Image (spheres, rainbow, N blue to C red):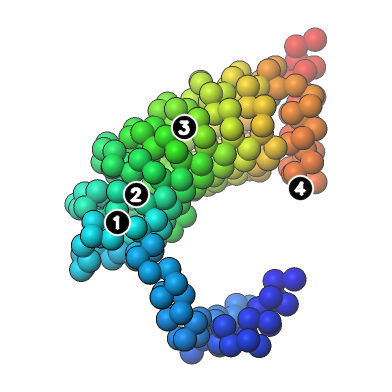
Amino acid sequence: MGKEYIRQLLGMSFLQDSKLPKTSGGHMAWYNMHDLVHDLATLIVGGELIVSSVPSKSKNVHAQKYCRYALVTKYDQATKLSSVLPSKVRALHFSDSSQLGLSCGAFSSAKCLRILDFSGCSSTMLPVSIGQVKQLQYLTAARMQNEVLPEYITELSKLQYLNLNGSSHISALPESIGKLGCLKYLGLSGCSGISKLQESFGDLKRMIHLDMSDCSGIRELPESLVISQICSILSYLSAPVSRQFLNLYVASRNSNI
């Protein structure tokens, strides 16, 4: 279906073949947005979107009071995040930043932030100030370097999506993770350092997708998980991961008999 969408966009000249050299394997195709479509999109979006290259700092983003979406590239950590972000930004994506370490008060001014995406960083260290972003609903912090997920993250009562995939340094989740009552998706794929799920996990009543693939350290599931939650979670998992999850559940219950 994705190929059909691409074909239609090419047919309407929304996209055009990229002039970048093709990869040796030939398995990837590159496309560019047509210049006219890009100009039209820029005109419509106006000041709601900024792309900020931190080393250049060529724009006064505070003047763009209507900006809602920001892409920050090459964040150098020596620059205060508040100096490159509009106060009312709602979606923040980091790109082309190698090892991202943020100061304690990095998000103190981002009161309206709903989406925070670190997927464009090779590694991330979450600051304790993450708990100040009360409106946050979507957090992608794959390959996180924290050994323990900050306890303050459980203060994000509106968080629905949490992706920690590939964060092998994490040894434990917060004991009070059950306070994330709106959480629907939790990605723990490759978090091999985690040895257990906290008892409060059973309080995540809205959880429908839990990715525990390659979580080799987890040997059992908490007793607080009820069968209705198990069935809901299993329906969203692939067959191999579903079997792994179900085996953990059965083993946990047998060990308590």
* Disc number lying in front (2 or 4): 2
* Disc number lying in front (1 or 4): 1
Q: Earlier in the sequence, mark 1 or mark 3?
A: 1
From the image, tell me which residue sits under label 4. 238
* Disc number lying in front (1 or 3): 1
Element on which disc 2 rests = loop
Q: How many other residues sit within 10 Å of disc 1, few (<14), some (14-19) or many (≥20)?
A: few
Element on which disc 3 rests = loop
Q: Quadrant of the C terminus?
A: top right
- Asked if the residues shown at circle 1 and circle 2 are in contact, with their CB atoms under 8 angstroms apart, the answer is yes
- Quadrant of the image occupied by residue 169: top left
State whether residue 62 is above or below residue 29: above
- Between marks 3 and 2, how big is the CA–CA gap? 18 Å
- Between marks 1 and 4, how big is the CA–CA gap? 44 Å
State whether residue 192 is above or below residue 200: below
Name the side, left or right, on which 233 lies relative to 187. right
Element on which disc 4 rests = loop
Badge count: 4
From the image, tell me which residue sits under label 2. 88
Q: Amino acid at mark 3?
A: Leu
- Between marks 1 and 3, how big is the CA–CA gap? 25 Å
